[in-house]
Image (tube, helix red, strand yellow):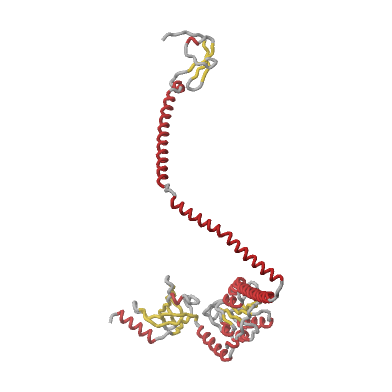
Amino acid sequence: MTVTALNQAVAQLLERNLPLTWVSGEISNFTRAASGHWYFTLKDSGAQVRSVMFRGRAQYADFQPKEGDKVEVRALVTLYAPRGDYQLSVEAIRRAGVGNLYEAFLRLKAQLTQEGLFDAERKRPLPVFVKTIGIVTSPQAAALRDILIALRRRAPHVNIILYPTPVQGEGAGMKIAQAIASAAAREECDVLLVCRGGGSMEDLWAFNEEVVARTIVNCPMPVIAGIGHETDFTIADFAADLRAATPTAAAELAAAPRDAWLQLLQRQAQILSRCMHRQLDDHAQTLDWQSRRLLSPKAAIAARRLQLLNLARNLNHSASLPLRQARHELMQLTQSWQAHKPDLTRPRLLLADMQRRLQQASRYRQEAHLQQLSGLRNQLELLNPQRTLERGYAILSDHKGKALRNTAELKPQSLLQVRLASGTAEVGISSVQTKLD
């Protein structure tokens, strides 16, 4: 045999011959891997054994153990073949001592079952319409907040009375029973909720006491138990008239939603309305039948009126017949005209082509005119006097603004205006001397 085959055979031998077993010990070397698996050593004063609890099982544990914790594990004895290590594959874990509590729970449950406290015939039905709900729980419990939120959402019309009591610790069972007895004596609620949130078996043990169960059974109003999570069961759950998986579920079971009541009332109103209308219709038919048996001028007038309506209908039909025939002929003429209507597709195409060519010729002609206008603008710019002045020349003019072109027009002691490229100036002539070029 290979080592692998040997280890696999030993693992199968252990798993077949040692069934699931509860093993008690102390936690040591506890490690929570990134994968979610738990690895630890379970030991006592004389020995130790490696243990593993895989993530699929560990996620249902109600606590995470730490070094030194006394625990009890339900495990399968096996062998880890790759290393040849003998180990426990843990499927469930609980704190040490829970086994004794569970045995006490089973003994009390069997005793009360034999007495008939849990019989279905003894269970009381819930009232159809609840006006007031009593709650037995701790004022600081998160379960109370969940119940109030659920009732405010579903049934805001319901009154709520809290009977405060501790739900955990020494003497909590007797105090819970006293709170239930107080609610029973006052008789001010229609249904009573006994609730608390989840926890370990030790945390919920107050609800496993016999005095709580008997007080619930003797309570005059129906009792709903909403204790712990869905997987938690207590003696109070069996004694109650109805068990809810959670405190929130208990609140939902205690009172029907207000919307459901409103819808029911609306349906009942519709049924009542239909019944009234049906009775009115029946009476109306009876009245019609009785009236038809009477011979009265009113009936004769009604018959004449009916005859007149028939004649009017025939007259309208006779008058509308020529109109319908004319419309039919018009439709035929329209169809004939559509069949002989000339096809204008080709002329429209020719017209579109001519319009395109005309637009193109007009565009070419406009571009030629623009080019010619640009050439004339350039020529005109060359003849601009301002350009001549900018080359250093000047324009002389007399006081009337007349341009002087001849020296004979110059007179001594006169003022002349000189226009340069930039601005004008006045100059005086003291004397005139003619020079020949």
The residue lying furthest to the right in this view is: 297
Q: Quadrant of residue 188?
A: bottom right
Q: Is residue 87 visible?
A: yes
Front residue of 175/294: it is 294
Quadrant location of residue 372? top left
- Front in this rendered view, residue 277 or 385: 277
Q: Quadrant of residue 47?
A: bottom left
Q: Residue furthest bottom?
A: 114
Asked whether, in this view, residue 190 is left or right of residue 14, the answer is: right
Residue 158 visible: no
Q: Residue furthest left?
A: 1
Where residue 135 appears, as percent x and y from the top left, is 63, 77
Tell me the quarter of the image containing the N terminus: bottom left
Residue 221 x %, y % = 64, 83
Q: Position of residue 274 (x, y in %)?
A: 63, 74
Does residue 358 appear to the left or right of 304 in the view shown?
Answer: left
Q: Quadrant of the C terminus?
A: top left
Query: Quick check: 332 above or below 209?
Result: above
The number of callouts visible is 0
* Residue that appears at 30% across and 81% down: 5
| Residue at the image position 66 percent from the left and 79 percent from the top | 189
Q: Position of residue 192 (x, y in %)?
A: 63, 80
Q: Residue at x 60, y 71 (%)?
A: 153
The front one of 161 and 81 is: 161
